Image: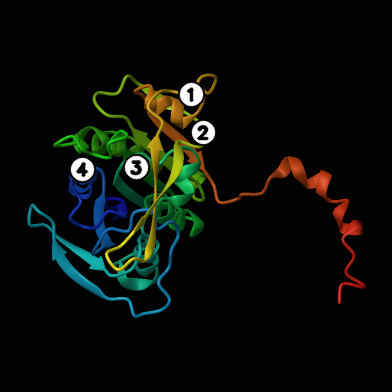
Amino acid sequence: MGKPFILVTNDDGYLSPGLLALRKALSPIGEPWILAPDRNWSAASRTRVFHKPLRFSSARLPDGEEVHVTNGAPSDCVLLALLGLAPRRPDLVVAGINMGANIGHDVTYSGTVAAAMEGASAGIPAIAVSLDLGPEGGAEPSPDYEIAAAITARVARLVLARGTALARTLINVNVPRGVPKGVRVTRLGGKIWSDDLVRGQDPRGRDYYWLTGEMLTSPPPGEEDTDVWAVLSGYVSITPLHLDLTAYPMLNDLRQWEDEIRVDDAG
């Protein structure tokens, strides 16, 4: 039996240093096959490109390794691979290493998480991995992707060993800056950004708006079991996610609406 076939993608584009580090770390345990966007798709979520043709071509990583690129979004990368552009069906989908944490409520914005989600929705075990760059968003000269890549390889071994038991589960891995203190298995935390709106005028007198904000810099008290607390406290966070967004505690409470929302006279 050959090595596991690992589909690797990201949302920062194929030239991201995190992608190169990930390929190197995964090579000893499997056969990484890269199909990544040809540009940055940060915060793309589960975008799919319907309004124009998708292109598929070859490119090279900074180390000269040949990879595959597309003009599509991260989710498109996974779909293209699964629909026939990859040489065979992946045993594992790995998305990352994202430049910046994907924790708390912000996971729904993430193109990295969405790419892994695409794999999970197809019944393939999937990992999304992100490296916290802090509130400055990577102003430091050289984030250490090697640590995050090594941790991802260890997680990948464990996921592959579980086989189909994790077939529809997405493992969201977030690595703190610096040397991690340890590992925490966590639940999703809450909001990590305080949103703000900057208003201004361009040189032609037209109004423009710029969405901005500030990221939490200290762990939220009382949330020691969350990914937000873990990463901001210096721990690797591992959060199992699935696609079912149903609020189960509310189902029975809302079933009375079946009779209260009348459809016989709605028109």
Check disc 1 and report the residue beneath it: 220
Among the 4 quarters of the image, the one containing residue 141: top left
* Label 4 Cα crowd, 10 Å radius (few <14 / some 14-19 / many 20+): few
Check disc 2 and report the residue beneath it: 189
Mark 2–mark 3 distance (CA, rounded to whole Å): 16 Å
Identified by mark 3, the residue type is Val
* Label 3 Cα crowd, 10 Å radius (few <14 / some 14-19 / many 20+): many
Report x, y in % for residue 96: 30, 48
Identified by mark 2, the residue type is Gly
Q: Earlier in the sequence, mark 4 or mark 2?
A: 4
**Residue placed at 36% from the left, 66% from the top?**
206
Report x, y in % for residue 124: 44, 54
Q: How is the image coloured?
A: rainbow
Q: Are marks 4 and 3 in contact (CB under 8 Å)?
A: no
Report x, y in % for residue 144: 19, 34
| Mark number displayed over residue 83 | none
Mark 1–mark 3 distance (CA, rounded to whole Å): 22 Å
| Mark number displayed over residue 28 | 4
Q: Secondary structure at mark 4?
A: loop
Q: Secondary structure at mark 3?
A: strand
Q: Are marks 1 and 2 in contact (CB under 8 Å)?
A: yes
Q: Earlier in the sequence, mark 1 or mark 3?
A: 3
Q: Secondary structure at mark 2?
A: loop
Pair 4/3: label in front: 3
263 or 206, which is in the foreground? 206
**Image position of 100 (left or right of 18):** right
Mark 1–mark 2 distance (CA, rounded to whole Å): 9 Å
**Image position of 19 (left or right of 245):** left
Q: Secondary structure at mark 1?
A: loop
